[in-house]
């Protein structure tokens, strides 16, 4: 347990620095970028997030599970084979992107391929290798190496972004240029840090075992992108990059919930597989159940705080043009909390290598999400994307539950889940009630409520977080 706490703390500190710094920089970006420029920046980030999946074919995901199937004498060869495969695939996809750039530009028709798409493509190439190295560090539980790469990439790109946007006044182009140059700087650092961890190889049998595990995840990741990020594509087509900018700000602030979940997952996921693969089934399920229930409460508390304070944050730190993003934040936070809970079922499914079934579930939810946006967004505006996110993530949770119930199910505390989701929904509606009050009244009221709530949590911390607080080594 102490190892989980230590790694979670380090991951959380690293991600907290990035999340907090990114959040503090948002007012700067929104002040020196037009709302449309901010929409362009957000759209390119979305494009990069799907392109990186094609650059790697999700091979790096096999490190998380298949890596443990090999003995110590074969692990470096497996890691090296995956590395070489990703390099070759990335080079091919990069060339393909420029060869068919006209077709690629149809994703966001209002954004020029040169320089925005072109710079983003090269940045994503470097990001694919950096992401591979980060995954390797997580699997080997080398938290310090992970933090070096993660923080270096963040601080270098942030410095360059500020320089190009604030000093040179280059707008959205300055942002994508900063990302590219940051990737170029961090790339050799990653190669240096993994030099003793890999053996350059291209073992066919090892690659095939990786393909069997990773290909369904490749399809699943594409579907996940459609499920969670395609909303900006619809907003761009039906409305404008200004609307994309407003929605994207709400999405970024709501993503604090996802970032908190990722910080915990980076430490928890390897521990999950270690527990279930080295203990009796009944013992493993008992331990995991306790962790899950505590972590659900952690995610829920974080979500509650973000929803409670999002209106104050937007009013204090962002131009008036972004005020409409408040309702976006509240709704997306609920959707993201549901997604974090569903992630526990993903782990259970992957333990039994149910990657194909998970892919089918994700594709189904993605189609459902696209259908909602396609049929309703043009009539009800970009708030449709908020509803479709909640609805599709809820469907994903239900289908994954039905899947793992038949294979490898570790119970959740459903009372806690339903209680928090319902409470957060009510809180989101109350936020609309507060909008017309003076800012000082809103802040005073929410400070009192927050202090009362945090005090309640503190005095019941043993009951709520008991399993996470007991420093018992697994």
Image (cartoon, rainbow, N blue to C red):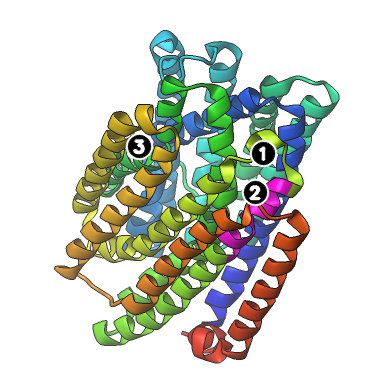
Q: Position of residue 325 (x, y in %)?
A: 57, 42
Q: How far apart are marks 2 and 3 (CA)?
A: 28 Å
Whether residues under marks 1 and 2 lie with C-beta atoms below 8 angstroms apart, the answer is yes
Other residues around mark 3 within 10 Å, as few (<14) / some (14–19) / many (≥20): many
* Mark 2: secondary structure: helix
Residue 149's disc is 2
Taking depth in this image into account, of 244 and 265 the one nearest to the observer is 244
Residue at image position (77%, 37%) is 28
Residue behind mark 3: 226
Q: Which tag, 1 or 3, sits closer to the chain's start?
A: 1
Q: Main secondary structure of the magenta part?
A: helix
205 in relation to 450, above or below = above
Residue behind mark 1: 186
Whether residues under marks 1 and 3 lie with C-beta atoms below 8 angstroms apart, the answer is no
86 in relation to 140, above or below = above
Q: Which tag, 1 or 2, sits closer to the chain's start?
A: 2
Position of residue 334 in the picture relative to residue 188 (left or right): left
Residue 131: in magenta span? no
Q: Position of residue 48 (x, y in %)?
A: 50, 31
Position of residue 246 in the picture relative to residue 156 (left or right): left
Find residue 126 and report its image quarter. Answer: top right
Other residues around mark 2 within 10 Å, as few (<14) / some (14–19) / many (≥20): many
148 in relation to 140, above or below = above
- Residues rendered magenta in the picture: 305-315
Q: How far apart are marks 1 and 2 (CA)?
A: 7 Å
Q: Where is residue 353 in the image (x, y as percent from the top left)?
A: 23, 58
Whether residues under marks 2 and 3 lie with C-beta atoms below 8 angstroms apart, the answer is no
Taking depth in this image into account, of 245 and 224 the one nearest to the observer is 245
User: Looking at this rendering, what residue extends furthest in the right direction?
Assistant: 167
């Amino acid at each position: 347990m102490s190892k989980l706490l230590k790694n979670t703390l380090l991951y959380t500190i690293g991600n907290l620095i990035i999340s907090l710094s990114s959040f503090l920089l948002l007012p700067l970006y929104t002040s020196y970028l037009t709302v449309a420029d901010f929409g362009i920046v957000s759209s390119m980030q979305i494009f990069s997030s799907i392109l990186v999946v094609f650059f790697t074919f999700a091979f790096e995901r096999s490190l998380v599970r298949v890596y443990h199937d090999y003995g110590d004498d074969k692990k470096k060869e497996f890691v090296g084979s995956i590395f070489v495969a990703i390099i070759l695939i990335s080079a091919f996809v990069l060339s393909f992107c420029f060869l068919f750039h006209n077709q690629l530009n149809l994703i966001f028709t209002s954004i020029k391929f040169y320089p925005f798409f072109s710079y983003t493509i090269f940045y994503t190439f470097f990001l694919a290798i950096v992401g591979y190295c980060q995954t390797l560090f997580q699997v080997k539980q080398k938290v310090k190496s992970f933090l070096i790469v993660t923080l270096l990439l963040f601080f270098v790109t942030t410095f360059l972004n500020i320089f190009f946007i604030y000093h040179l006044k280059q707008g959205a182009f300055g942002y994508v240029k900063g990302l590219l140059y940051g990737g170029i700087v961090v790339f050799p650092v990653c190669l240096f840090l993994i030099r003793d961890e890999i053996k350059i190889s291209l073992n066919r049998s090892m690659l095939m075992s990786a393909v069997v595990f990773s290909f369904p995840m490749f399809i699943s990741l594409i579907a996940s992108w459609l499920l969670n990020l395609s909303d900006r594509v619809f907003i761009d087509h039906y409305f404008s990059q200004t609307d994309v900018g407003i929605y994207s700000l709400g999405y970024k602030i709501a993503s604090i919930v996802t970032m908190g979940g990722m910080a915990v997952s980076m430490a928890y996921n390897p521990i999950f597989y270690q527990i279930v693969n080295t203990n009796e089934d009944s013992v493993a399920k008992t331990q995991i159940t306790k962790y899950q229930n505590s972590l659900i409460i952690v995610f829920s508390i974080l979500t509650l705080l973000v929803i409670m304070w999002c209106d104050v944050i937007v009013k204090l730190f962002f131009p008036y043009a972004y005020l409409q993003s408040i309702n976006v934040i509240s709704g997306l936070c609920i959707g993201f909390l549901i997604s974090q809970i569903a992630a526990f079922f993903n782990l259970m499914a992957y333990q039994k290598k149910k990657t194909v079934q998970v892919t089918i579930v994700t594709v189904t939810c993605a189609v459902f999400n696209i259908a909602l946006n396609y049929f309703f967004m043009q009539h009800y505006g970009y708030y449709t994307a908020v509803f479709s996110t909640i609805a599709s993530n809820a469907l994903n949770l239900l289908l994954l539950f039905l899947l793992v119930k038949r294979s490898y199910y570790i119970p959740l505390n459903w009372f806690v889940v339903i209680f928090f989701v319902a409470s957060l929904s009510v809180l989101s509606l109350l936020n609309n009630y507060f909008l017309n009050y003076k800012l000082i009244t809103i802040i005073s009221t929410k400070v009192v409520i927050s202090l009362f709530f945090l005090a309640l949590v503190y005095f019941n911390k043993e009951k709520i977080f008991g399993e996470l607080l007991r420093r018992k080594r697994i």
